[in-house]
Image (cartoon, rainbow, N blue to C red):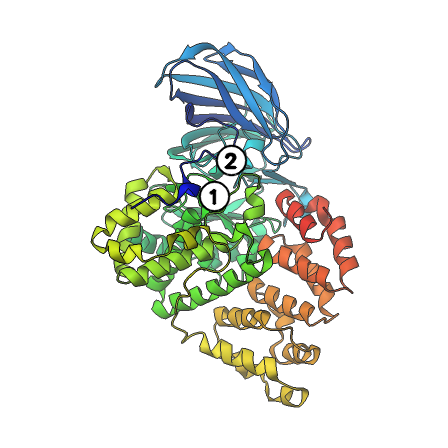
Amino acid sequence: PGSVSGRMAEQSDSSSFTATEHFTTRHLALTLRVEFQSRRIAASAALTVEALRDELSELTLDTRDLKILKITANGQEVKFALGNKHCFKGAALTISLPFKLLRGQHVVVEVSYETSPEASALQWLTAEQTAGKKHPYLFSQCQAIHCRSMIPCQDTPSVKSTYYARVSVPKELVALMSANHDGEFADDQDKSRKIFCFRQTVPMPCYLIALVVGSLESRVIGPRCRVWSEREMVDAAAYEFEETETMLKKAEDLMGPYVWGQYDLLVLPPSFPYGGMENPCLTFVTPTLLAGDRSLSNVIAHEISHSWTGNLVTNKTWEHFWLNEGHTVYLERMIGRSMFDEKHRQFAAIGGWKDLLEAIETFGATNPLTSLVPRLCDTDPDDAFSSVPYEKGFALLYHLEELLGGPDIFMGFVKAYIQIFAYSSVTTEDWKNCLYSYFSDKTEILNKVDWDAWFHSPGMPPFTPHYDTSMNDACVTLCKRWTIATDVELDCFTESDLKEMTSMQKIEFLALLLLETPLRLNNVKRMQQVYKFNDVKNAEIKFRWLRLCLRAQWEKAIPLALEMVTVQGRMKFTRPLYRDLYNFEKARPQAIETFQKNKPSMHPITAALVAKDLHLV
């Protein structure tokens, strides 16, 4: 097929300083000493670098807030310089080699450095901020461009390397990484510490390097699956995620063998900003998934799917993030289909379309960040993060599935795409060429797709899919009844309205109400009387319910919403609740005060984005 338009020519990564066309990192050997007292990691990173051109005598790496102490190349001390600090990219580290490399030659560059207590990849929790209250806790979140605040590296998803790590921590704590375990022993330099070793033999982008240190325990939940968390949550987590191995097998049936060895889950403290993070060998998840009824395990299916789409085949730059997320949502829903049935997949897709509508409403329909392939030249990838790459990406894949002959035929393509590009990084152009060559007998159908609109136009997609609404109908009907009910009609609602509904249907019912004009205050009060949503444990239900109450200007909801933004920090919940509190005049001063009070204990990524939501920056 012809080019996807000049707007998508092979571009270098605008979020990184490194010159990927001159050299690439093949392996990373890390020595990390985690120091809770000073909130720093004292470290050395040895990068095995391969020259991609002749006469190479200078390397540029990404860093952010790192204190560089010394650098050697093949053991020889070398000169280096740190550039000016850019607001979100950090500072370029330029290393002068004392010799010239030829294309194909390797050099080992070892950087001795310290991280800053403000490193954006790391959150240091005091003992009080943990469940056990006895020991401090550290975890990292490197996606999208935060790895550079923990390790000097080529911080771009276009570069993949293996890694080895030795991590020294206080001996009463446990260290885990996004790699397979390679032993542990006493630290001979310091009797009060212990060293944990890790080996990752599958080349991966550095945004997937992850570290956690805390008072952690594990339970075996399958032949290659363990769940890790603080003792207080570990049994609840083992129950909630018992179906992990079943999902992993379903995923292998769809995509081929799982190549990463172990598949462990780590339930983090509540301030973790995302639902899940697909760190290889060790998926990180939010404790807000612990609903007690396994109803939110689709997040696990999503993170498992990333083992193929994202981790094995990776977006080359963050502009092509939909390749990671759109395919992963598609696979997550295919796993759901094989665990339940097609109706479930259709129902999940309807919910996703609703999330897309809401994201586009929040950003504005003409906002360039609502394009499937946005241009990020001066944009921090964190600011571009939304449901768009997930759900607009899924909608495109579902549209193609319908055009090309159904889920089984289209899955054949997805599997081929994974096999062709495994262990590499791709652009939308590469994906489209692969699609055309796989369906070479159907190019006429493919040429009818408005590619330019799908990829480059902001707002809703150029085509609205038709989903099977059978599981959705009950939600729509109940939503309509509540929307039009007058005071006299409120008595006709009873708790049995929800009796036949699954958790997912209750979430959908509330999501539908959020798309309508705000409910009357009396209707919301009656809903609490009959459905008792204030007492619900499921975070997805509680979150939508509280938004509904705030929009109806129910003052009783203010303390409950302020509590929810305080006791957990998942951005999916925290940001919209803060925005709704801000828009409710009576709640605005309390919202700002609560944020300012809690800011020191919030995750740095969340705090930065909520400050924007509250118009404080």
Of all residues, the one furthest to the bottom in this rendering is 488
Q: Label 2 neighbourhood size at 10 Å, few (<14), some (14-19), many (20+)? A: some
Which residue in the structure is indicated by mark 1? 319
Give me the disc on residue 464: none
Q: Position of residue 373 (x, y in %)?
A: 46, 47
Task: Give the residue at x 54% y 49%.
Answer: 385
Tell me, yes or no, if residue 294 can be seen here.
no
Is there a contact, CB below 8 Å, between mark 2 and mark 1? yes
Q: Position of residue 420 (x, y in %)?
A: 28, 42
Q: Which quarter of the picture shows residue 138? A: top right
Rounded to the nearest whole Å, what is the CA distance between mark 2 and mark 1? 9 Å
Q: Position of residue 545 (x, y in %)?
A: 62, 69
Task: Give the residue at x 51% y 14%.
Answer: 96
Report the front residue among 481 and 113: 481
Q: Label 1 neighbourhood size at 10 Å, few (<14), some (14-19), many (20+)? A: many
Amino acid, disc 2 = Ser
Amino acid, disc 1 = Glu
Marked residue nearer the N-terminal end (2 or 1): 2
Q: Is residue 139 above or below residue 345?
A: above
Which residue in the structure is indicated by mark 2? 14
Q: Position of residue 225 (x, y in %)?
A: 41, 48
Q: Which quarter of the picture shows residue 473? A: bottom left
Label 2 sits on a secondary structure element that is loop
